[in-house]
Image (cartoon, helix red, strand yellow):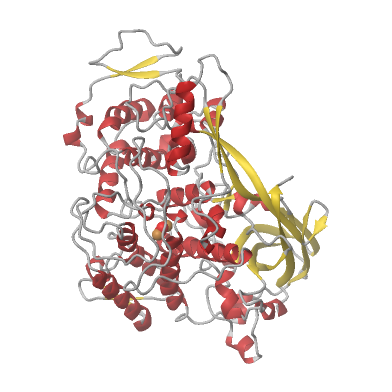
Amino acid sequence: MSEAQSLLSLFEKPYSDVTTPRANESMAFELEERPVVVPRVGAGPTITLPRRPDADPSKLGTATVVPRGSAFSFFVSTHRRAAKDLCDAFMKTTGVQDLVQFAARVKDVVNESLFIYSLSFVILHKKELRNFRLPSLVEVFPQKFVPVEHLIKSQQEAVRRDENEETPIVIEHGPDFSSNTIKPEHRVAYWREDYGMNVHHWHWHLVYPIEMNLNRDRKGEIFFYMHQQMIARYDMERLSVGLRRVEKLENWRIPVPDGYFSKLTVNNSGRAWGTRQDNTFLKDFRRNDFGLQPLDITELEVWRSRLLDAIHQGYMKNPNGDTIPLSDDVTSGKRGIDILGDTLEADADLSPHYQFYGDLHNMSHVLISFSHDNDNAHKEELGVMGDPATSMRDPVFYRLHKFVDDVFQAYKLTQRPYTMEDLSMPGVVVNQVSVTSKREINKLTTGWSTREFEASRGIDFNSPNPVILRLTHLDSVPFNYHIEVTNTEPKPKVVTVRIFLAPKHNGSGAEMPFMEQRILWTEMDKFNHTLNPGKNQIVRSSKDSSITNPTDITFRDLDSKPMTSETEATEFDFCGCGWPQHLLLPRGKPEGMAFQLFYMITDFEKDKVEQAQGARSCANAVSFCGVLDAKFPDSRPMGFPFDRRPPPVLLDAGVLTTADYARLDNIMMQDVTITFLADKLVK
Ligand code: CUO
């Protein structure tokens, strides 16, 4: 058994003792002071964990303050501190074996989700572990993805079964999710409860954590951009199923219309996530079991108004009273959107004045998570809004983040509009564009697919057979972009190709003016290309998107391809982060739905970012997840060119729609249809 496999085994069965056999019973840990006397049934080694004074709970800082068996929430500052203390302790280990022995020793004294979070963090950030990959969170914590009744039934089935029965137990789930058709919101449940999107969100917060001393480039700005894009995608999905676009949660004094009942459990013993009835009022936070101070809704309102003041005045103040200007047109230092992102999210280490501007977004998650039991009178658990792995299931997530995005958009509207020079690229003409999918031109298709995971890696079913989760999810037929571009200059030119998608019509069926459609444009791809003089044909696969992660890695994948610290970086890059490839396209409609693709060519000389020597690019999802230990690889503001108002000269000429941008030679638009086949997809 390699060191990598023993490290991987620590991701299995988080709620079982460390000495529970792992890796399909092929290995086990034993404690030095409690050696296993009866030989194990399974083959493979027993690894002895020596006593370690440094693993004593008293040496772990605040890491043990999060109770075992309960929820761990990165939105709660005391839990973040606990995570930092545990991550720091893991980071101090030297080499894989040392980490395995230390982590295995502390596993049973810290909160289970906190343990997996911290172990994942250290794998991403410890140099010698850089090439290791994380198993999918679906297999680590099936209970965060599948209703508890399925899991209990499988447990009963495992007990009932004859030992010699070899067929695996299969749990089928979806696309009929946690509510029924009485609720209009149910129409997008397949999307909100998609495993890949929830895994992505967990992973994103793991690679862009707050208060972890990481100094990631443009962290505040990517918090804005990635969440803005999720809201735009949600709106596209809503329009696909005939729902209105999401409305922001801005008035915290009126009831939240949508309830949410996840039917998921926090741990293996059936402890349920808190639920929320329809029309629940948010309440002042008055619990004392999280180590947080009481917090009134009034404070959220004060923080919001201070942030809006800063946006409209164009600066913030730090505790010394110094002025910090907010502008996206900077030649050095942080952009205003980056500062605002860090202040609003909030990151106490990076906010110019955390006491004054507060912790608006994190504490909104917390207040919403406890709207059912704000004072612990019912001893109820946190709601799903408290965990990035589950929060996107809840309709209120999108209302909250629509509000957050509105604050960011208020800032963006204070910035100077782009000029024609910002938008154009002399010497480049886009002649024609199209997408092809299975011999169809400009017609794209979505439908249902399934994906299997091994639930028995995360939960001990006491069964010799694997328990398989078969999850149904939205998917699309892959397609290619075709772009014909003329380089009118006599020498080759390196360019950036930017591709966005938006619905053509709004909820009323009308074509949208630019300012309405502006925040619905979602990035589909962004890549560099060298144009030769004359005509160039660019063909690009949808599978190479700049936002997606092609697949979730399972324990089985990792077993069959054992990792070492020398494994080629290209093979095992750090990103499990990334929008799921299967949700690259919105659902569309059975009768076909009109969308538009927007293609823009910009000059790489202006876009490029100087990277330090040796910076390694992650192959996937760069636009949403950045590049580890390197700068974000596009110098333009995230969301360019849709993050700002249109050039006044276009407005003066009567610009009303995005199509007016396509008057520029380097921009072209194309109508496409997305048709949803309410059936299993044949790719
Ligand atoms: Cu990702 Cu509120 O930041 O969930």
Q: Given the current orientation, which residue lies at the most extreme bottom position? A: 652
* Residue 290 seen in the figure: yes
x, y percent for residue 276: 36, 58
**Residue 616 vs residue 353: left or right?**
right
Query: Could you say which is closer to the camera, residue 533 or residue 130?
Result: 130
Quarter occupied by residue 404? bottom left
Residue 331, image x, y percentages: 45, 71
Residue at the spot x=73%, y=53% of the render?
479
- Considering depth in this image, is 479 or 235 the residue closer to the camera? 235
Look at 35% across and 51% down and name the residue there: 214
- Using the rendered image of the protein, determine whether residue 617 is visible from the camera's viewpoint: no
**How many circles with numbers are drawn on the protein?**
0
| Depth check, front residue: 670 or 316 | 670
Vertical placement of residue 319 versus 464, above or below: below
The residue sitting at the front extreme is 182
List x then y, in percent, for residue 593.
Answer: 70, 66
In the displayed structure, 428 sits above or below 43; it is: below
Please give the name of the residue rendered at 44% of the width and 81% of the height, measured from the top-left corner: 414
Residue placed furthest toward the top: 38
Give the position of the C terminus as an image quadrant: top right
Residue in front for this viewpoint, 66 or 395: 395
Q: Determine which quarter of the picture holds residue 662.
A: bottom right
- Give the quadrant of ligand 1: bottom left
The image position of residue 370, as x and y in percent, is 30, 57
